Amino acid sequence: MNPAPSTQTLTWRKRFAFAGWFMVIMLLVRAPTLFRSVLDWDESLYLLMAKQWQAGHLPYTTIWDNKPIGIYAIFLVFQEIFGANVAAIRLATTVFVTANATFVAAISYQFLQNTVAPQRSRYAAFAGICYGVASLSNDGLAANTEIFMTAFTTLAMLLAVAPGSQSLRRNAACGLIFGLAVMTKYVAIFEAPALAFALLYFNRPTKKEIYIRRLLATATGGIIPMLATAFVYADLGQMRLWWHDSVISNITRVAANVPTPNIGAVITGQLMNWLLLYVAALMMIVQIVVKQKRDQQSYNTYVFVLLWLGCGGLGVYAAKSFYDHYFLQILPVLCIITVLTYASSGWIGRRVLWIIVAFPVLAGYHALAQAVAPMISMNGGHINIQPDATERAAHDLNLVLQQDQHIYVFDDQPIIYNLTHQSPPTRYIFPSVLTTCFLEKVAGIDAVLEVQKIFAQHPAYVIRTLYPASAETNRNYAVYAFVNEALHDNYHLWKQEGATQIFQLTSNAAFRLPRKVHAGTCGHPVTANP
């Protein structure tokens, strides 16, 4: 006799078991990057913002950024516990990936009610492992906002689909958690329709007026994080600053003419990373359209996860930049769709399920190799682990910096400020704000004038890279012309570590500040002043 399908919910004991195993796996896999000084510019910015917050400076007051306050709060908590260092944010990433993998497993388990108990647990475990492994690629090694945002979003979805979600207190908690996702990165708001669907179509109430109560309770909880943030800034007289930097700048960014990415390269990269996950989504669409799922529960499940994927896809599209880490927003639901699709695809689908993870494993291995390779050297057949170029540059500076001297990181890694215990000479420490035309408009500043103010402070050392990250069509050549002239007249190349160049001030007394180069030269090379 075949075993009967399991309809039980995932017990807390099993959830903790999943979380424990996922944590062990993620710690082992991500361990090589634990002390890597930088994997992405964004994480360096968040670390420095949190460090300023630790020093008593509310976000946006001393450093400019347009992200909501949640990501800095998460970094602040982990820096309070583990110190203001890179390892703290690597651990934060591991914890949130583990939590997200657990939530993905729990949702998958909930939706696999027509599956026998042993297979149901294996499929749920697969979904969680699939998320953890796939999150290594698409810039998921770095502490990008999507890693943290999606953990809140997935937990909110779990609360919405689990039994007992008809409770108004559960709905309010669901909204509160979703509000935390939005205040970690605003694009989470695009997934609100999927959350509303889950609240209305799973665990349906007997009275129709309860629908409205559920949504109102969820909306009330959801608005609390933003209202609390606004209240704090208003109470400290910084409401206008928060509104401009965190809200208006994002509206400006969405409305602005975004530099066109190479769509072909974006598609190729996604197919190399998560090909079979996208194939699973296509297979599910075919199943729901062609086979017309008979029972209402399965139909609602398929509609929900596809709606969730579509809403998340809008979030990926919203910024129109299509950076790799943007796609992390849809990874949790992709993993859920993958396990549901292949689990219902008959004997072949069930047998090849674990092979599916090969694509993200290979992509993750490639990402890990790229991250760790610069730190590994061979000497007489022995493997030596050495600091990466950014950390070596910071070490060089720490040996010579005097108490009254300061540095300026022009277009290299801003984490150097943290590694040298230096206070940035400008609010705009994210290099792209001053070196690209697009973010200059989003920030609403004159980049050349800002750089002029920085050099007027006579920084003792200026750090730049041989390979600017800004695309040539978006590069602010007026800024580069100004910096080139300032370095030529007042500095000399002191040391180079990898692609990082460190320029030392030649003579403070003879400092010659270049005259301002004309603006309006974005994307077009200009000749520096003679």
Image (tube, rainbow, N blue to C red):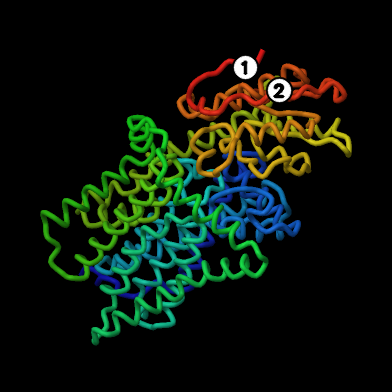
Q: Position of residue 376 (x, y in %)?
A: 64, 29
As shown in the figure, which amino acid type bears the numbered disc 1? Ala
Q: Are marks 1 and 2 in contact (CB under 8 Å)?
A: yes
- Is 496 on the left or on the right of 180, as rendered? right
Q: Position of residue 80 (x, y in %)?
A: 71, 59
Location of mark 2 (residue): 514
Q: Position of residue 453 (x, y in %)?
A: 71, 35
Badge 2 density bin: few <14, some 14–19, many ≥20, Cα 10 Å: many
Badge 1 density bin: few <14, some 14–19, many ≥20, Cα 10 Å: some
Q: Residue at x 61, y 24 (%)?
A: 517
Whether residue 327 is visible here, answered yes or no, is no
Q: Position of residue 490 (x, y in %)?
A: 78, 20
Q: Quadrant of residue 466?
A: top right
Residues 47 and 14: in front is 47
Location of mark 1 (residue): 528
- In which quadrant of the rendered image does the N terminus lie? bottom left
Q: Residue at x 52, y 29 (%)?
A: 470
- Is 42 on the left or on the right of 484, as rendered? left
Which comes sooner in the sequence, label 1 or label 2?
Answer: 2
Residues 526 and 130: in front is 526
As shown in the figure, which amino acid type bears the numbered disc 2? Pro
- Is 146 on the left or on the right of 416, as rendered? left
Q: Quadrant of residue 332?
A: bottom left
Residues 515 and 283: in front is 515
